[in-house]
Image: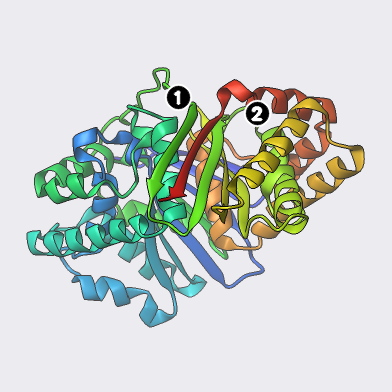
Amino acid sequence: MGYNHKMIITEAYQKTKLENGLTIITENIPTVRSVSAGVWIKAGTRQETKDINGAAHFLEHMLFKGTEKRSARTIARSLESIGGYLNAFTGKEQTCFYAEFLDEHLSKAIDVLSDIICNSTFPQVEMEKERTVILDEIGSVEDTPDDLLQDIFTEKLYPDNSLGFPVLGSKQTVQKLTRDQILKFYRDFYTFENIIIAAAGNIQHEKLVELCIKKFNLPLASENPVDLSPVKTGRGEFTIPRTVNQAHVCLGTVALPYNHHQKYELLILNTALGVGMGSRLFQNIRERYGLAYSIYSYLDFFKDNGMMVIYLGTDKNKKDQALKLLDREIAKLRTKPIAGSEFKQVKAQLKGNIVLGLESTMRRMSRLAKMEIYLKEYHPINSVLENIQKISRDQLFELTTGILSKDRLLKVAFLPN
């Protein structure tokens, strides 16, 4: 088979899509000596059914447990022995296997990454060991109230939908997962069309393309589409009695997809509300009244929707007062535009956070991959900063009144027995 491909070049960004469907993206940063490279599979929890919940994450673990030429121990030491790092993570819509290494070790890193992706043997004895490890991981989440509550919040926000499934799966599903089920998930989704290879750092694009052509050997198959039928979303209030010392509360709503034209307005809103020590929630609930040690907000973006979540941990005797203040802060945002001075400060904070984050080759690599997955195009950082700067207070207020509308909110709480 030939390897005809087309190339797109913009500044330090380069993209090649091979005839077999494999997409390779790089951003050259000649001022560093390191490279971060990731193999991104467009499959995660969202591709699971209820009976195989946890399969994507279990598969991620199994790909480190031996190939035709490397043992699990050899894989673990393959990059550490040359000063590098190898790891992976599973999310709702992607799984990523990534390596960080000195630029001189590009060939070795791609050899290891391609080996675990293409040549893993899935030994049954290792599967049973890893099942125990994952069950312990689930147990650790169950012992961490804020992590567990956020899983439950997501489940209630997306009822009867795989977006609401926990990434780790449940103890019941993980105990029942078979080698055949894991292998089927692998064969269904680990195909050329479903994979993006992204790298950032001191890297030559054509060298990476050459290595990927030589090293990656996967089935040719069409991308498995995600079911984007309308997602039923939850709202209302749920209180869950639990043996905890604090009251833990998650409050939030369904928000915007990754490619939405108002995404940057939402990022500004989230920054003003609960990002950092200068945010409204931190200043007014923790600093002014001392009602919470931990309070913050965050966003998650998916292909067809997203979510905005506030987390609050407070003493059980202060819960009512803290929640009253939380409701008041949200009401203020949806009834009155933020002042011009605060608006400028929040914009500056968001732009600074974005730019400082890009000091990391890992963050740059991740940004490349997500833009390709969700946007199918590259957005230079300067254009992102310009788009943020163009947003007006009226645009922000219009978004806020819709996103934080009372009838959209979901509240889930752990209360001490």
Quadrant containing the N terminus in the rendered view? top left
Q: Residue 214: image x %, image y %?
A: 31, 55
Residue type at the position of mark 1: Thr
Image quadrant where residue 212 sits: bottom left
Report the side of 233 relative to 212 (left or right).
right
Residue that badge 2 annotates:
404
Residue type at the position of mark 2: Leu
Q: Residue 176: image x %, image y %?
A: 12, 46
In the image, 357 versus 19, the foreground residue is: 357
Taking the image as drawn, is residue 333 in sight? yes
Image point (12%, 60%), residue name = 128
* Residue farthest along the right direction in this orientation: 341
Report the side of 236 relative to 160 (left or right).
right
Image point (66%, 55%), residue name = 291
Report the side of 84 relative to 255 (left or right).
left
Q: Label 1 neighbourhood size at 10 Å, few (<14), some (14-19), many (20+)?
A: some
Secondary structure at numbered mark 2 = loop
Q: Earlier in the sequence, mark 2 or mark 1?
A: 1
**Which label number is shown at residue 199?**
none
Q: Residue 130: image x %, image y %?
A: 19, 62
Image point (29%, 50%), residue name = 57
**Which label number is shown at residue 233?**
1
Taking the image as drawn, is residue 209 in sight? no
Secondary structure at numbered mark 1 = loop
Q: Residue 93: image x %, image y %?
A: 40, 39
